[in-house]
Image (cartoon, grey):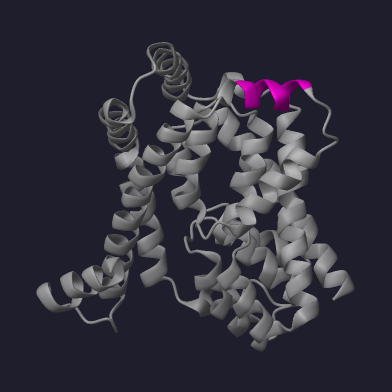
């Protein structure tokens, strides 16, 4: 429905052609902005209800005190793999986890894996590249989330969450305790939860618009051939350059698979192409602008740096063995 709305607005009301770069960019912008803001409100509200009823403090205590031998990171990564979100759409759930006090490493495992792997992309990968490469793609995406979440979780990065998020955590703890103490009925919890969800949207809407505007411009105006010339097999630096070139882009995994298929058909090694895909969906500039509301710059730099390194190493390994 949202895509039909964007098409109606851009192609019928404004009368731009879908064949033009401007029409494509504006359609992308309207559709993704509407989708992400709606998801942000719905997921923030859902997490508000979960946090108000579910004993999140007990779950937090369990995760922080029990030795689960990394299993918690695997569960978070698997949960990320089955959620059909792009990098920006995953952030509302990330905010909800952080707001509820879930350990940061576990939330990172989800945030890393969620945009990298989803069922639509898996089906498209299977049809385009076969079972072996699809399994490697899925396993590497989940493994990247597990290892990345584990490493980031050991770095004591909580102080680098933004003041806004830390205030959300304090308010959530007070509100949850108040709901439990007064045994507040469901109908009286709705307004405070929706108010908090609206507050979250108001706090991040500028970052959403800026990030998606950049992604939309890249989506509409940068031709595929621009990337192909820097990613050929005879260049040793192809993998890191592919990752760097991918960062300003913005797309979900399903949307980028056809582009990867074109790259491979033009002779780009599969490992380089997969590294480009992972960077597009997991390290996008729009994601960074939205994360700025959630994290301080130092934490964003650490997060992007760790994941960039892992994606580059994965690309080299794929090229070596595939």
* Quarter-of-image position of residue 214: bottom left
The relative height of residue 269 versus residue 178 in the rendered view (above or below) is: below
Q: Camera-side residue: 278 or 319?
A: 278
At 45% from the left and 76% from the top, the residue drawn is 223
Quadrant where the N terminus is found in the figure: bottom left
* Quarter-of-image position of residue 181: top left
Residue 47 lies, in percent from the top left, at 45, 37
The relative height of residue 203 versus residue 130 in the rendered view (above or below) is: above
At 77% from the left and 53% from the top, the residue drawn is 143
- Could you tell me what secondary structure mostly forms the magenta stretch? helix
Residue 116 lies, in percent from the top left, at 62, 59
The reply to whether the magenta stretch includes residue 175 is no
| Left or right: 107 in relation to 137 | left
Q: Is residue 12 visible?
A: yes
Residue 14 lies, in percent from the top left, at 12, 72
| Left or right: 169 in relation to 266 | left
Give the extent of the magenta segment: 58-65
- Residue at the extreme bottom of the image, as rendered: 265
Residue 282 lies, in percent from the top left, at 58, 54
The reply to whether the magenta stretch includes residue 64 is yes
Q: Camera-side residue: 9 or 217?
A: 9
């Amino acid at each position: 429905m949202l895509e039909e709305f964007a098409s109606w607005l851009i192609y019928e009301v404004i009368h731009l052609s879908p064949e033009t770069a401007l029409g494509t960019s504006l359609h992308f912008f309207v559709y993704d902005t509407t989708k992400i803001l709606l998801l942000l409100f719905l997921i923030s509200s859902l997490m508000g209800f979960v946090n108000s009823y579910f004993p999140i403090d007990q779950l937090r205590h369990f995760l922080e005190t029990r030795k689960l031998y990394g299993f918690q990171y695997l569960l978070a990564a698997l949960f990320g793999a089955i959620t059909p979100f792009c990098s920006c759409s995953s952030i509302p759930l990330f905010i909800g986890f952080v707001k509820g006090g879930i350990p940061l490493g576990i939330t990172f495992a989800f945030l890393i894996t969620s945009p990298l792997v989803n069922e639509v992309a898996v089906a498209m990968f299977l049809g385009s590249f076969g079972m072996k490469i699809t399994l490697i793609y899925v396993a590497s995406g989940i493994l990247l989330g597990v290892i990345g979440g584990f490493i980031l979780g050991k770095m004591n990065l909580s102080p680098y969450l933004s003041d806004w998020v830390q205030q959300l955590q304090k308010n959530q703890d007070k509100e949850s305790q108040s709901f439990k103490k007064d045994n507040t009925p469901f109908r009286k919890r709705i307004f405070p939860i929706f108010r908090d969800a609206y507050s979250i949207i108001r706090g991040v809407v500028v970052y959403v618009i800026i990030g998606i505007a950049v992604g939309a411009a890249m989506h509409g105006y940068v031709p595929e051939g621009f990337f192909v010339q820097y990613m050929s097999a005879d260049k040793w630096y192809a993998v890191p350059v592919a990752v760097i070139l991918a960062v300003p882009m913005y797309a979900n995994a399903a949307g980028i698979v056809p582009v990867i298929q074109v790259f491979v058909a033009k002779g780009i090694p599969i490992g380089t192409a997969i590294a480009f895909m992972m960077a597009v969906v997991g390290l996008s500039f729009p994601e960074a602008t939205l994360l700025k509301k959630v994290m301080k710059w130092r934490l964003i730099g650490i997060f992007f740096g760790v994941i960039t390194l892992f994606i580059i190493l994965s690309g080299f390994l794929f090229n070596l063995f595939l």
